[in-house]
Amino acid sequence: MEDSPRYMISVAAELVGMHPQTLRIYENKGLVRPKRTPGNTRLYSDADLERLRTIQQLTELGLNLAGVQRVIALQDELRRLQARLELMERRMQEEVARVHRQYRRDLVPYSQSTDLLPTRSRRTWTSTS
């Protein structure tokens, strides 16, 4: 999803089917954080629009703005944790691969290694030479 700010408030409001004042209210509540130009014009990204659609869906389900804030906070935390888990899994796989590369390749499986051992008499080892 694109996070580049590109839509002015009127365009963003039209794209998500909301009134521009509703977007301002959501910004004041901290539900969405559009970027600002040097002239202080709000610019919304595709990610912001997706968040606005999520807010819209949650309010249509009957959640008040406090409930919406909590759901969004939980969704954000879930995304952060998923990203962290993916990073940890990649690091673990890289470490396993590194350890595997260090294994000696000339090791012989145990079942084949018995042929290489000297023969054994009852109490002493004898050499084959």
Image (tube, rainbow, N blue to C red):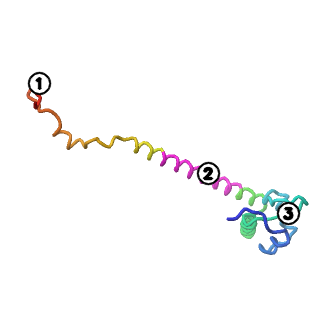
Farthest residue to the left: give it: 122
What is the quadrant of residue 101 in the picture? top left
Q: Which residue is mark 2?
A: 81
The one nearer the camera, 22 or 49, is 49
Q: Amino acid at mark 3?
A: Arg
**In the image, 125: left or right of 113?**
left
Which quadrant is the N terminus positioned in?
bottom right
Identity of the residue furthest to the top in this view:
123
Query: Residue at 52% across / 47% down in the picture?
Result: 91
What label does residue 42 carry, if any?
3
Q: Earlier in the sequence, mark 3 or mark 1?
A: 3
Please say if 15 is above or below 39. below
Please state if 38 lies on the left or on the right of 57 as rendered: right
Instruction: Say if the magenta span includes residue 36.
Output: no
Span shown in magenta? 73-94
Calculate the distance from the C-alpha at mark 3 to the C-alpha at mark 1.
Answer: 89 Å
> According to the image, label 1 marks what residue?
124
| Predominant SS along the magenta part | helix
- Measured Cα–Cα span from mark 1 to mark 2: 61 Å
Earlier in the chain: of badge 1 and badge 2, it is 2
x, y percent for residue 57: 72, 69
